[in-house]
Image: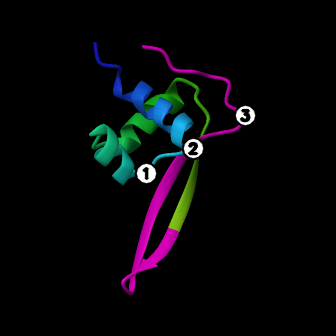
Amino acid sequence: MRKPQRVRVYEYMKEHNGITTMQAYGDLRITRLSARIFDLKQLGVKIDKEHIVKKKDGERIEYDRYFVAADNRIVPSY
């Protein structure tokens, strides 16, 4: 049985110290990361967000990286 997407996102954030939309799609095949983040927050998981701005090939690129807060005590279950 495959783990629920919210659990896979949580485990990925813990293992990789965060997740972006591109990582969620590329590594986990999850297209609606913000919905899974919402689900985790509804369960009581403390999640922080870092807004990142970079320049690549002269273009401005902006994205968010979500990570489990250091003081989080909740672990989502199946």
Compared to residue 42, the image places residue 30 above or below, namely below
Q: Is residue 55 magenta?
A: yes
Query: Would residue 3 appear left or right of 68 to someone viewing this image?
Result: left
Q: Marks 2 and 3, how far apart in space?
A: 14 Å
- Label 1: few (<14), some or many (≥20) within 10 Å? some
Quadrant of the snapshot with the N terminus: top left
Q: Secondary structure at mark 3?
A: loop
Circle 1: residue type? Thr
Q: Which residue is mark 2?
A: 17
42 or 8, which lies in front? 8
Q: Residue 25, image x and y in percent?
A: 30, 46
Q: Which residue is mark 1?
A: 20
Compared to residue 32, the image places residue 50 above or below, namely below
Query: Would residue 48 appear left or right of 5 to someone viewing this image?
Result: right
Q: Marks 3 and 1, how far apart in space?
A: 21 Å
Q: Which residue is mark 3?
A: 71
Q: Which residues are magenta?
A: 53-78
Q: Marks 1 and 2, how far apart in space?
A: 11 Å
Q: Residue 68, image x and y in percent?
A: 59, 38
72 or 56, which lies in front? 56
Circle 2: residue type? Asn
78 or 40, which lies in front? 78
Kindly indicate the quadrant of the structure image that contains residue 56: bottom left
- Measuring 51% from the left and 20% from the top, which residue is drawn there? 76
Mark 3 or mark 1: whose residue is earlier in sequence:
1
Quadrant of the snapshot with the C terminus: top left
